[in-house]
Structure formats: C-alpha cells, structure tokens
Image (cartoon, rainbow, N blue to C red):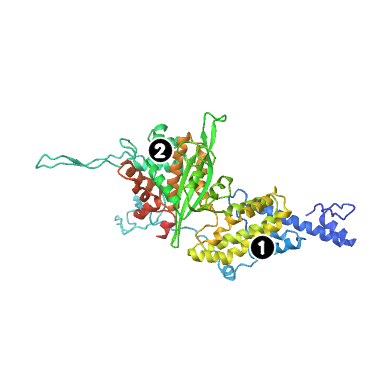
Amino acid sequence: MPGTAPTSETTKKPRRGPVLEVLKALLAEGRTEEVVALVARLVSRNSELERLLQDAKTKGKKSEGVSTTQLKLLLGGLPANSDGDVAEVDARLRRSSGIDEEPPQKEQARPKRTRPARRPIPTNLRRVENVIPVPAQQRPCPRCGEVRKCVGHEVTEVIDLIPAEVIVRQDKREKLACHLCEAEVVRAPLGEKVVSGGRMGARLVAQLLVEKYYDGLPLSRQVERFERLGLEVALSTLADQVAWATEALRPVWRAAMSKVLGATVMHLDATSLPVLDSKNAKGIRLGAIWGYVGADVKDCGTQHTALCLYNSTGKREGQREGEIGPAQMLAMRVGLTVADAAGLFDASFKRAGLLECGCNTHARRYFRKALDGGDKRAALPLAAFKRLFAIERRLQACTIDERRRGRQERSKPVYDDLIAWAIAHQPNEPPSSPLGRAIRYLLNHQQALRRYLEDGVIPIDNTVVERLHIRTALTRKNFLFAGSDAGGERAAIAYTLLGCCKLAEVDPVAYLADVLPRLATKKLCLRDMPALLPAEWKRSHPEAVRGKAAAAR
C-alpha cells in the first residue's frame, strides 16, 4: 500500500514517497543500515496497528483480560533493551510467564466444542397440556365416511409463557366448634402477609423488592406495570411495602454482619450511592454502599455471606448516629481481610490481629491502564499475571493444603520474577507515568499482595466483593439516587439479602416470600436469625435452589 516512508535519523535529506520505492532507492545506493532501520520502524508500527485493531474488536466489552495473541504481538514489537541487567530480568520474567510456550499436545488435539443448536428444555418447568384437535373437515374417513377415533397424540414441547396475573387471594379461615358443649370456637391462623392488617401478600412484596433492588425496576415503573395487569395502586403504597419489608429483614441483616465478621476471610470494597440532600448546593450528596463478603473456607468448599452497609459520606468513619464506616467495621474484625490498598485502611491494618491481604486484580489493573495508554512494556507483567491467575484456576478444586503447596511450587517463582522485573525497571521510570504508578503500587504493597502464596485459604484477589457491587451499579443507573439516608439504609438491607441469595444460588422471590411472613409474626428471637440466612435456609428448601446448583441435582 503506498505511503510515506519514515525518515531515518542518519539521512541528511529526508526521503518521501511510497515505501517500496524508497526501499529500492536505498538498496540501490547501498545504504543497508537505513533499510534495516526503516524495516524495524515498519514492523513496530505494524505491531501497534495490530494491537489497535484488536482493541477496536473488543471495544465496549467490560473484560479486562488480554489474550495471549495480543500479548505476543506486543512483546514482539518491543525493542531489545540495551541495559544488560534489565534485559536479563525481562528474559527471566518472559520465561516464567510461559507466554512463549506451545499449548500442550492434549489441548491441541482436543476437538473444538460447539454449542448445540438447541439446549434441552429444563425438566423442572411445569408441563401444561395443549390438545390440538384435527380440523372438522379431516375427521371423517375418506373411504367409508365414518368419524375416525383418536389413537394417540404426537407430543411436541414448546417453551411458552403464562402472563403474570394479579389476583385477590381470599383467605377462608376455617372455624371449628364443638356441637356437644359450648367450648370456645377455634379458628385457623391468618394467611401470610408482611404487615398485619395489610392487603399485600408476601409473594407480591417479595417481587417488589427483587424487581427494585435486583432487576433495577423503580417503583414508578412498577406502578405502570400493575396498571397493565388491571390493578391501580399508589406509588406511596408500594414505597410503604418496601419500607416495612426491609425493616422486617433488619434482624437477618444483623445476623449477616455477625457471620461476615466471624468468617475465615473477609473481603471489603465500596461503591458510590447518590442521595438527595436539600442542604447541598447541587441537591445531591454522594454517599456510599460498603460491601463485605465473608468466606468460610473449608476443604469441602467455601460458603459466602454478603453484607452491605450504607454510609452517608465516603469517609472512613460513620458520620451519623448508628452508622458503621469501614474503620468501625475493621475495628470489630480479627483475622484475614482482603482489600485494595486505599489510604482509608492504613490505620486499621496497623492494629495487631488484623492481617491485610492484597488484591492482585487491582495490581494487574494498573498495568492494564499503562498498556491502554500505549506503553507496550506493560505486556510482560500482564503475561505474568495471566500465568498466576491460570495457575489459580487449576488449583481451585484442590484442598487447602494442596493449594498452598501448588502456589509455592508454581506461583511463587513467577511472582519472584515479577518483583525482580519491577525493581529493575523502577529507577528508569518516572513515578508519575502509568507504568511508574503500576510498579510503585506493586512494590509498595508486595507483602500484602504475596500473602496468598503462603496460605491456601487466602484468595488471590478481591473480585468476589467487586461482583457484589455489579447489581448495585446497574440498579443505581435506573433510580439515579436514594431519596434519603433512610432510603440508603433500606437499599443496603435489600442488597445484603439479595446478594446472599445470589452467592447461595437461591431464588430470591421464593426466599423472601417464605421469610418475610415469619419475621412479621414477631415470634422469632435473635438466635433464630442465622438459620434464616439464604445459605442455611436453602438446606430445607431444595426446590428454591437456582443456577449451577440446581443443574447439578
């Protein structure tokens, strides 16, 4: 393709014109060094264009991953380092990352899996018969004229939908009386409701919570949906139901807090939540939802418990009465705690008994930002992180002790080479550059980041709590802000229980429809609350299990 040839620094008179013509002219004049320099620049430019093309193909995708092909292209375009010591650590990290290794023969020979054209229809779905009769003109026999008799049915299964329907449930409470004496009449208990004296059933209220805080459907839109179903209901009525339901769930929310604080490992991270505030010049104040996940790690598996706490500000300590900020939460915690290296936690982690564990996804993210900024040198540490996470996936099904040994034998050498690479490059890299910031973060927090290598219980990153905030972020886009601090607290309670349902693979509507009426009776005490957490509740409700757990049964 015609273009302008790059100008060599040694050329006195710049040559311009199509690349091939310039190359021919330089070769004819015997200027081989300039030819080599020109080809090298063209190769480097081609590698950059390949990377930009690959980025354009993945534009809009949220994955932070970089494919092996991309990394090889980037590493291939890197010039050789003239510093012998730096070149040595580069080569060592490249070897330990395994980026140049050929895939195992077994993986090459494995046929590519193709998705079936049709997945089987789930067996748990209710079957509804739809008898289709033969048309009247075809029922008589064409030979004798007699009406043909049915000899069977040809069954074809079609997935369909029965539209939602708002019903009026008439609770007919049986009354019993003795006909022999005038004893007291006994009546059946009241039907299930969230509020005594209310008119909304438990399943309807459960659906309200799930659609608002999980599906991101604001109550104003739910009002319109009910109108289409034939029920006119005021927005304030639905808001009251949400308020009553979340208040009823508060004791279970407190049980989740106790469970998280006592877990083997605790994760924490935050996301913002705008709140209406008439005292603020803009009318909105930026609050926060602090997410915590407690992981009870055992050889037989890990049980996760979610917890969300609302804070009216982004400060480390709660600013309102009864508000629990991250500093107060960490003050109640003892043991392994996974977090990013935010300054909010520095004072807390100086306390004895609280052990900081770093997030390697966070450390990797800095190098990805450097790569996105055009620094191809970040490809090498990204290749090393790719190897570390690949090893972790293979060790996922192992016992705690096997995982620790595997990390020591396979992950530790890679991490050692990664740290050596960062130490060698740091003196020559401006601290304010994207790569300089990535190196500084890795070296300053390497003790916390490497702690997972020493213990099979500690996770490699903090993504379990980051995923918890995905639903918060999606619903926040729809309702934009919380109406008050009380609304923020209600949201935190709802996010907590729905997050627990997600981690336990439990149907949230079935869970809330069962738990809310039991809480409304006020007959339960505090020691009963841990059994109402979704992970414990699903043991007695196998029919409500959803996702992979249901498919495995």
Task: Tell me whether the residue at label 1 lies in contact with that at label 2, contact meaning CB atoms closer than 8 angstroms.
Answer: no
Is residue 367 found left or right of 179 in the rendered image? right
Which of 302/185 is in front? 302
Occupied quadrant, residue 228 = top left
Locate residue 15, reporting x and y percent.
87, 53
Amino acid tagged 1: Leu
Q: Is mark 2 on a helix, strand or loop?
A: helix
| Vertical arrangement, residue 113 with respect to residue 368, above or below | below
Locate residue 17, reporting x and y percent.
84, 52
Locate residue 148, reporting x and y percent.
30, 56
Mark sitting on residue 93: 1
Residue that lies at the very extreme toward the left in this rendered image: 180
| Vertical arrangement, residue 377 with respect to residue 185, above or below | below
Bin the neighbour count of mark 1 within 10 Å (Cα to Cα): few under 14, some 14-19, many 20 and up.
many
Q: Quadrant of the C terminus?
A: bottom left
Amino acid tagged 2: Val
